Amino acid sequence: MTKILRYFWVFFLFVATSVTAQQVTVPHKVKKKETIYGIAHSYGITEEQLRQANPGMERPDYQLNKGDVIQIPVIVNGPSSNTGNAQSHRAPIRLGVMLPLHKINNDGNRMVEYYRGVLMACDTLKKEGVSVDVYAWNLPENGNLQTILSDPNAKKCDIIIGPLYSKYMTALSSFVESNDILLVVPFSIHAPELYSNRHIFQVYQAPNELTESTARRCAEWFKDYHFVVVDCGDSTSTKGSFTSTLRRQLEVKGHQYSLTSLKSADASFKNAFVAGQRNMVVLNTEHSPELLSALSRLNAVRNGNPNLQISMFGYTEWLMYVSHQQENFHKYDVYIPSYFYTNMQTPQAMTLQRHYTNIFHQEMMLSLPRFAMSGFDHALFFLRGLWKYGKTFDGAAGRFGYQPVQTPLKFERIGNGGLQNRSFMFVHYKPDYTIETVNY
């Protein structure tokens, strides 16, 4: 039997009341050695709140200097008013979550962690004066969606996050459209309803769309490179579709490329590279054993030709190998395409990890992506957007200051249908041992 899980496995989430709040600011003069993180922490606010109150901080080149006067946001109780063009909610936002919230299998474990991140975002928003009522339903793979949708609380939602499984999309799409509810599809499931239903947001594109868009961006961004496509003989990988699509993109644009194989003789393998031009190596697998073999072959080529310029274009899965391969990633100037990236050493990421551990008495799973961080980013983005713009919120760039922990979000409408996240980046492991994210 499907059950409503209200405030599931969390004890700190507030119960929204009818008390409204206003945000005001107070000045702060920056002292020597103060940081954005330190100032935010001293006032009991987040870095994101501080950046929102000081728009200049969101510039990539912003520097905090001694003597600067910045504004500190403070929430005070009192009557509120709607100003400007924002269509603000004063009643609590009603958030529904329809995901497999159980401990039976990996899907459930991941979604429980994702949901915990959602609740942590709600707690953060509470400090900003944003009230949220959360309704959560366990929707496993063999669940009964109709039972959930017949619950009166489901129709009251302003926004629903889910589902995880494609088979629920048709019924849930129809439900949100008929009840004027926004639907956030958080993962890359098959959702053709996106093209006709304006209520739907899709965070991750479907795999075939990702393959096409990544290959196109790769061919465009690295147009001055000579591509070397390496057949790794891995029958278990599906990345052959990417290299095939990339080759087609290169041919359309008139770019030259070479084909070789991990089984090729040394001389044949070396001849695939071009001297005096940057070479971009692309494997047709994401798996670690073949990556190690390719790195060994590249080392041999480079030892015999130290001036040869070699870079590699990888896969999102390679982010799981960073702890073992970071030296090689920097050595070979690796670019990894991704719709998410987390530098686990940033103050924001470390604070979120610490809070998660303190609240739930366990570490986040070592997954890709970190599901609690995904839930936190998604909920913070959409709930803040709803609070400010109401149901006209479209998730487009520039709607408000947004510094994601892991998942950049920038939505564009698909024809007359819903909205799809178009944020995309290359995670670049530079030869100088720094890491940059190149937004595309």
Image: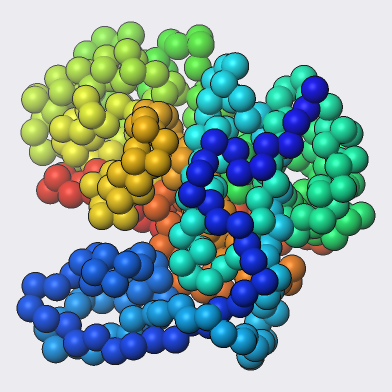
Tell whether 266 sits left or right of 105. Answer: left
In percent of width and height, residue 191 lies at: 75, 40
Q: What's the image's color scheme?
A: rainbow
Residue drawn at the location 31% of the way across and 35% of the way down: 312
Residue drawn at the location 39% of the way across and 67% of the way down: 48
**On-image quarter of the C terminus:** bottom left
Residue 394: name its quadrant.
bottom right
Q: Nearer the viewer, residue 429 or 185?
A: 185
Residue drawn at the location 14% of the way across and 73% of the way down: 34
**On-image quarter of the N terminus:** top right
Instruction: Give the total number of marks visible in the rendering.
Output: 0
Residue 414 vertical position relative to residue 32 in the rendered view, above or below: above
Residue 5 vertical position relative to residue 294 in the rendered view, above or below: below
Q: Nearer the viewer, residue 272 or 309?
A: 309
Residue 362 vertical position relative to residue 181 in the rendered view, above or below: above
Tell whether 32 sits left or right of 128. Answer: left
Q: Nearer the viewer, residue 190 or 182?
A: 182
Res. 424 in view: no
Residue 171: name its quadrant.
top right
Tell whether 347 sits left or right of 341. Answer: left
Res. 52 in view: yes
In percent of width and height, residue 25 lies at: 39, 86
In percent of width and height, residue 11 lies at: 51, 44
In percent of width and height, residue 82 lies at: 66, 87
Residue drawn at the location 17% of the way across and 83% of the way down: 30
Residue 39 vertical position relative to residue 77 in the rendered view, above or below: above
Q: Nearer the viewer, residue 201 or 10?
A: 10
Tell whether 58 sits left or right of 110. Answer: left
